Image (cartoon, grey):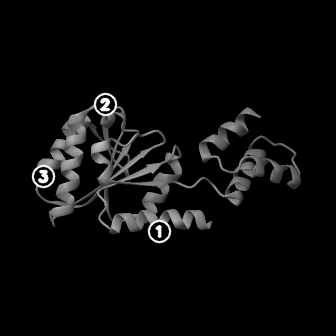
Amino acid sequence: MSTQKLDFNFNLLSFFEANIPIIYIQTNDFYNLDNLINKLFPDIEILEYLPDNELLDFKTKKSFGKIKLQNFLKLILDNQNIAETIVILKDPFQINENNISQFYLKNIALKKLYQEKYNITFFIVSNSFKIPVNLKEFISPLQFSPPDFYEILELVNKFQSTLFLNLDQTEIKAIATSLQGLERLEILKKLNLD
């Protein structure tokens, strides 16, 4: 595992342990981030909220149904005791469009900081989330690392074998080098285009 990945893992765990109420993870690579979160937090209840207002059990992907974000946040705020829980908000554009959701998130963050038995952490996962001014003091941003060179090599090799291409190692390394710095999803798109 690359040092970039280890740094991200360390920082995410550090933010979580430091009682940061809202952690903004900038990425489009939901698949790899989901796998990582499952590994880092195996014993913690995790809920996932999708942009289409669907609430899921993160680990099983079982749906609890649809609920508007502000109603979901109000339910959380109204709860007096919350055992260790993570809520993952994926591409939550509603927060920027809705002052009521911002109000609830801010009050949940304050409650987490000052109430001992209120242990909930939000992960906002998006590549284009704009942090609202009145939430800045409660949100810590974190950049999810793109795949390292060896992970890219692995992707290129899998792609080559799937399509029965005849590329030598020099060509594979040249392709992998040209894809460095891109996220996994962008790499797969590029491979499918060329």
State the residue position of label 2: 97
Q: CA distance from mark 1 to mark 2?
A: 32 Å
Q: Is residue 4 left or right of residue 22?
A: right
164 in relation to 10, above or below = above
User: Where, by quadrant of the figure, is residue 102 drawn?
Assistant: top left
44 in relation to 180, above or below = below
Answer few, some or many: residues within 10 Å of disc 2's Cα (few below 14, many 20 plus, some between 14 and 19): few
132 in relation to 112, above or below = above
Answer few, some or many: residues within 10 Å of disc 3's Cα (few below 14, many 20 plus, some between 14 and 19): few
Q: Is residue 166 left or right of residue 182?
A: right
State the residue position of label 3: 79
Q: Is residue 29 visible to the viewer in this orientation of the structure? A: yes
Q: Amino acid at mark 1?
A: Phe
Q: Is residue 103 left or right of residue 141?
A: left
Q: CA distance from mark 3 to mark 2?
A: 24 Å
Q: Is residue 67 visible to the viewer in this orientation of the structure? A: no
Q: Amino acid at mark 3?
A: Asn
- Tell whether label 2 touches label 3 (CB within 8 Å): no
Image position, residue 77 (x, y; %): 15, 48
